[in-house]
Image (cartoon, rainbow, N blue to C red):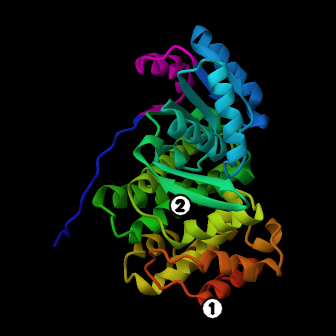
Amino acid sequence: MTRPFTFPGLTTRVVFGHGTLAQVPEEVARLGHTRALVLSTPHQQAEAQALADRLGDRAAGIFAGATMHTPVEVTEAAIAAYHAARADCVVSLGGGSTTGLGKAIAVRTGADQVVVPTTYAGSEMTDILGETAGGEKTTRRDPAIRPEVVVYDVDLTLTLPVALTVTSALNAIAHAMEGFYAPDRNPVTEALSREAMTAFRDALPVLIQDPKDPDARAKALYAAWGCSLTLGQVTMALHHKLAHVLGGSFGLPHAETHAVLLPHTTAYNEPAVGDLLNPISDTFGHGRAGKGLWHFARSVSAPMRLADLGLTDRDLDRATDIATKNPYANPRPVTRDGIRRLLQQAFDGDCPA
């Protein structure tokens, strides 16, 4: 029997294909705006300037200061630039860092957002904003955070480095994983998540051999969209909490942290969710979801140990304390002993039991 569900609907306009970057000026005009501030990280400043040039008279300038984990002080500088440029919307070009900055500006100013993702991180379809202040990362949801338009251009991912391709994809798979057992899951997100995992499973080995394969890139970006949509529609739990703790409080890199944690957080909740994670074990094999993800991650040369990302053995107790100090919903009770064991396994890179 089909269980009852609520599907909240889709509000973000999506433009997907090859060469769709050319449609960004049209999308800005469609929103009724005339002065777009283009956002990027320092690393992508040249690409941001090229997009501003493409916008022509609709460009208000660029702000190339986005950084990981959306520090509040960076947001404040970006808002000052937004007002100084007399901008009326933002165009965010890049991965999760730039998307997060655009969201932080939007929720404070009411600006509309056009997001152009260049990785598979997946925050572009969500109403979620994670920000860092005082050494801790906090997360909130608000309809004002959700971007109005997302432009997926497969061609922009053709130069994505292989290492970031892998970690960004595993980051996206984490959204799908938690969506399978979310209390507000629905048939739309479940179907997209199944399809996305299969697409990533098939695309990543091809991209390791040929990073510019256009069909595999299209398949991976489509999978990222599906996982992002899931992230934006349902409630996340333990995995995302731990990733925010390690990123916000210890400065660990975002995608790599998600990639390392994924098999271990999956395995932690697996005994508590019955057959809800069967789509993962069906896709990646090895009889168990956590174990299958661990073997897949190893097969695509993903980072496997928190120790390799800059975390130290001395950090594990503090990370456990931060992760467990505030109660939050999760299928399996979040205990100090349980989280400490999980982090130790992820620190050492062992296959989850």
Region of the chain picked out in magenta, as a range: 14-35
Q: Residue furthest left?
A: 1
Residue type indicated by callout 2: Ile
Residue beneath the point at 48% across and 51% down: 228
Q: Which residue has dot 1 on it?
A: 337
Residue type indicated by callout 1: Asp
Q: Secondary structure at mark 1?
A: helix
Question: Based on the displayed image, in which of its 4 quarters is residue 144 positioned?
Answer: top left
Q: Is residue 30 magenta?
A: yes
Would residue 201 appear left or right of 245 to someone viewing this image?
left
Q: Position of residue 91 (x, y in %)?
A: 57, 28
Q: Is residue 332 magenta?
A: no
Would residue 172 appear left or right of 232 to someone viewing this image?
right
Q: Nearer the viewer, residue 58 or 297?
A: 58
Image: 157 above or below 202:
above
**Which of label 1 and label 2 is nearer to you?**
1
Q: Is residue 123 visible?
A: yes
Q: Is residue 286 visible?
A: no
Q: Position of residue 246 (x, y in %)?
A: 70, 67
Looking at marks 1 and 2 on the same chain, the residue that comes earlier in the sequence is marked by 2
Would residue 285 appear left or right of 136 to someone viewing this image?
left
Q: Which residue has dot 2 on it?
A: 173
* Label 1 CA crowd tier, 10 Å (few <14, some 14–19, many 20+): few
Q: Position of residue 81 (x, y in %)?
A: 69, 26
